[in-house]
Amino acid sequence: MFSEYLWGAGGGLRNSHGTRSRVLAQRSVTTVGAVTAVDTLPPSDGRPELLVLRAIKLGDLLVAVPALRALRRDFPEHRITLATTAWLAPVVELVPAVDVHLAQHGLDHPISAPAGAVDVAVNLHGAGPESSDLVAALGARRVIGHADPTNGFEGPAWPDGVHERERWTRLLTWHGVTADPDDVAIARPVAPPVIADAAVVHVGAFHGARHWPTDRFAAVVRGLRDRGFDVVLTGGADDVGRAAAVAGAAGLAPEAILAGVLGLQEFAGVIAAARLVVTVDTGAAHLASAYGIPSVVVFGPAPPEAWGPPAAGRHLVLTDASVRRGDVFAEDPDPALLAVGPGDVLEAVDALGVAVTDAPTAR
């Protein structure tokens, strides 16, 4: 998080040629108001309780949005609590289906809700004993999840080889809840974006298996600028060095580096206001899908058949499944990622037909 941003003289974000970017939205960055997850299920507000378990990362949360939206439609009278990772709070706030964010740090501690307080418990985390036992301990009247004979839960068998969004919408459909796997939209942040109308190049990823080489990102940045795009670089705190290397090799001004300085909701706002997103398979790709922003996504260890964007959107996936190693926790880039070159990415950008004068898609 940060409260101040560096701007060029005269208040504009400047590129290496000294011209002011036309995509500036504001002179400084302010963090969103305090957004926190509660440690214990709050006292009842009079509505029956529906609790959803999904305690993982940003992308995992966003692929569950279609299921969350379906639950909201099917249970309009319930208070919906999402038990998920606390640091996701700024994005959970953007999911209108959720009323309460209950902090759940993995599966090594009980869900902090009194036994019997939950009317409907939904397991969108998995089908193993760890998640199933946590849900069983809630003592809910109804459980929506995959089959678990040990706890006496009815449901479909765990399916292999399906997209994550479809996994959870099919689960709900089996339990009588109509769900659309392409219903991925989330709300836009209320605060104005730090920058609008830019091509956002996201250089970060949690593990080295998804680290596309910085020289390739730099070549893409140069190509985007040649096409008239204003470019900013995003990533987490651990990606600042990578972003600096990309900026240096591409001749991009340091002020265009947003890696490590944006809060999570500010990051979502930048994606929501972008003209184009170029990224590897990370939360940035899922945010682009949620906001209907054209994107080029380079896949490495994870198959796009399980984690890719909706087919109906302006999104293109690049990978080579024939050389995929598939170890998402490896520290060196997956061969499927390295099989994609900068020219492939720029060709995909051209194929998307995103003009510099395009306005972001409203969702």
Image (spheres, rainbow, N blue to C red):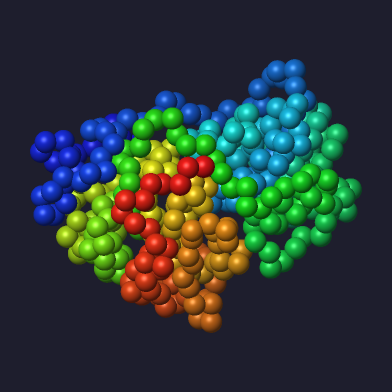
Report how many numbered discs are placed on residues in the image. Answer: 0
Among the 4 quarters of the image, the one containing residue 246: bottom left
Name the residue at 14% across, 41% down. 8
Considering the image in quadrants, where does the N terminus appear? top left
Please provide percent x and percent y for residue 265. 43, 37
Name the residue at 38% across, 58% down. 354
Among the 4 quarters of the image, the one containing residue 195: top left
Q: Nearer the viewer, residue 282 or 274?
A: 274
Name the residue at 44% across, 26% down. 34
Residue 29 shown left or right of residue 96 in the figure: left
Question: Would residue 279 be visible to someone looking at this image?
Answer: no
Name the residue at 29% across, 51% down. 232
Please provide percent x and percent y for residue 17. 11, 54
Q: Nearer the viewer, residue 65 or 44?
A: 65
Q: Nearer the viewer, residue 93 or 288?
A: 288
Residue 194 shown left or right of residue 63 in the figure: left
Q: Does residue 310 lie above or below 111 as drawn? A: below
Q: Does residue 241 lie above or below 92 as drawn? A: below
Residue 269 shown left or right of residue 214 in the figure: right
